[in-house]
Image (cartoon, helix red, strand yellow):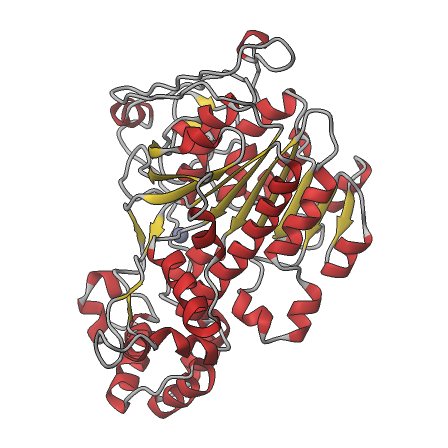
Amino acid sequence: MSNKISRRSILAGAGAVVGSTVVSLPGMASFVRPVEKRAKNIIFCVSDGMSAGVPSMADQFKDVNFGERGVWCDLMRRPEVVQGVMDTRSLNSLMTDSAAAATSWGSGSLVLNGAINYLPGIGELTPLYDLLGKAGMRRGLVTTATITHATPSGFAVSSAKRSAEPEIARQYLARGVEVLMGGGDEFFSAELRADKIDVYGEFAAKGYGVAKNRDEMWANDSRRFLGIYGKGQLPFSVDRMHNEDIEMAVPSLAEMTKSAIDRLKGGSEGFVLQVEGARIDHAAHPNDLAGLIYDQLAFEAAVDVAVRFAEEDGDTLVVVTSDHGNANPGISNGPAGYGDANGLSRLMKMTSSYERMLPELRAADAAGVQGLAEAKLGVEISADQAAMVVSGLKGGDDSPMQQFGNYKFATAALSMAVGTATGVGWSSGNHTSDWTLVSAFGPGAELFHGMVRNYEIFGKLLSVRGIEFKNPSMTLEEAQRAEGGGFELESDLHWI
Ligand SMILES: [Zn+2]
């Protein structure tokens, strides 16, 4: 970590001018208005890979089945909530990955997909949390992914490659992030790390409370805290809802958010907390409707925790957004045409994510697939559809699904069969370039009005604390020259 923070570049504290930061990139205009009132605390909520159809369907699912509206829907209807949309491209693609997306927020610079606060030929950029920590704010990261995954990493570390998760785990400690919660036991456990370093022990030696399940989280009130609730990503919400063992062992995102706020609040210079619903993205890649909607509802429950705290506190900015779209799901037709709005009610019978069903699906013949679809997804699929599902899961060259570029992934045919019953269609199994939604509440919310470029978020978050800082930036041509004309990109397509 070679980052140095110039004293002149930080104008925090009493007497500093309220921030009016300009982050300019070549060929791109950037505007940040002065804030009307500074925020003491910032809570930044990310539904990863959330196309606009996702909160629409979450809201409509609650309306159709419970006569209630979605949390985000209700938030957007409040007159004091500022609504914007965000352009999400990365330096080298209209389709960003989560590393480049989080970097745009975390350093104000567009980078190549796969990099975290890192530019070729320049090296490490100064992440947002270093600057806010220097200004005295306490910092937290909460996610349903591994805590070392791209989105939380983008706020707090620098790494040429997002896959360097074992190293990122130790960077969090070196940079002093106060509260960390998510999955990723394999990056902290001496038994599971290749270098056999006990990273849990390193955190404990620096005064962190360490928890490895939900009970330990509630029992430990340490203000510096590492909560790692299992290996890999945390389970999908639909699997948590239907498995008592998971529910008891793994906290929900809302519970982690509450626990994190309780640990972070009370400091003289406030706190910043990033809350990520990571698995909305992981459900969108395989077109898993139940995985998607129940995780979106869990994310919105966490947003509700953040907004309720902000309402009581009166000095907290809450931003709710997504880093990029994924697969653009949406209801395009009911099972019996436009007049049939009941497709989403079938979600009530869905009790498993695709991820959890996959071993059984792969082992099943067509009749077995029909049985699993009825038992775990509540849908009847035809014998012809089931044969397509089996062929898609095998993925060989003779599979019809291999003829359609956007639908080559294993569960594409299953999702089309489920979509015939629910009315939900998907554009692909990949990230999309669509604008994403941005909602902001509290002091500084006015900065998030209208069209926002992803790399402008960095300057906006700093300006609500009266801080001005600019990281280096470069054009794609400069990046190509620095890379010697070629890219070594890491793919974000990490799910089936
Ligand atoms: Zn993704």
Q: Depth check: 408 or 83 in front?
A: 83
- Who's the residue at 21% across and 77% down the image? 337
Tell me if 202 is positioned left or right of 33 in this view.
right
Name the residue: 44% across, 64% down: 293
Residue 18 lies, with reference to residue 433, above or below; the image says: above
**Any part of residue 147 in sight:** no
Q: Residue furthest front?
A: 79
Direction from residue 27 to residue 491 in the image, left or right: right
Q: Give 325 or 74, whichever is nearer the viewer.
A: 74
Q: Give the x, y percent position of residue 289.
A: 39, 68
> Where does residue 76 sit, x and y in percent of width and height?
42, 47
Q: Residue furthest left?
A: 403
Based on the displayed image, in which of its 4 quarters is residue 354 positioned?
A: bottom left
> Vertically, is 392 above or below 76?
below
Quadrant of the snapshot with the C terminus: bottom left
Identify the image quadrant of residue 102: top left
Depth check, front residue: 105 or 347:
347
| Closer to the camera in the image, 400 or 439 | 439
